[in-house]
Image (tube, rainbow, N blue to C red):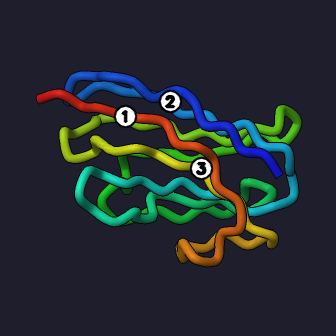
Amino acid sequence: VQLQASGGGLVQAGGSLRLSCAASVRTYAMGWFRQAPGKEREFVASINWSGGSTYYADFVKGRFTISRDNAKGTMYLQMNSLLPEDTAVYYCAARRGSVAIMIERRYDYWGQGTQVTVSS
């Protein structure tokens, strides 16, 4: 299984970015996690295999939207109203199961991460 995250960059507070994760699997649940400097990696959002079920961390609800296009083999994270505290390396992950979950250790495959920096 290969995962390739992209789309990170530098943006001003209040701006938007869309992250993409190209995946070689299309029937696994997937998710986004992030790790800020000096902090542990944390859950951001997850989506089931079909895209019909999603979960979000409280701190991104209403600002971020996770989605997937299985025909293209790609998962997305649309990030709006970005805050400086959203600055982190964002990782995409997949698990050998169809149900979306929030537990990091239950994910089996990880992408390399993409840096998101939000300036104030």
Report which quarter residue 95 is drawn in.
bottom right
Residue 89 falls left or right of residue 13: right
Residue 19 falls left or right of residue 8: right
Q: Amino acid at mark 3?
A: Cys
Q: CA distance from mark 2 to mark 1?
A: 10 Å
Q: Identify the residue position indicated by label 3 in the image.
A: 92
Report which quarter residue 112 is drawn in.
top right
Q: CA distance from mark 2 to mark 3?
A: 13 Å
Q: CA distance from mark 3 to mark 1?
A: 13 Å
Q: Which of the marked residues, 2 or 1, is nearer the chain's N terminus?
A: 2
The x, y position of residue 44, in whole percent, is 45, 58
Residue drawn at the location 18% of the way across and 39% of the way down? 84
Q: Which of the marked residues, 2 or 3, is nearer the chain's N terminus?
A: 2
Residue positioned most to the left = 120
Q: Identify the residue position indicated by label 1 in the image.
A: 116
Where is 7 relative to 21, above or below?
A: above
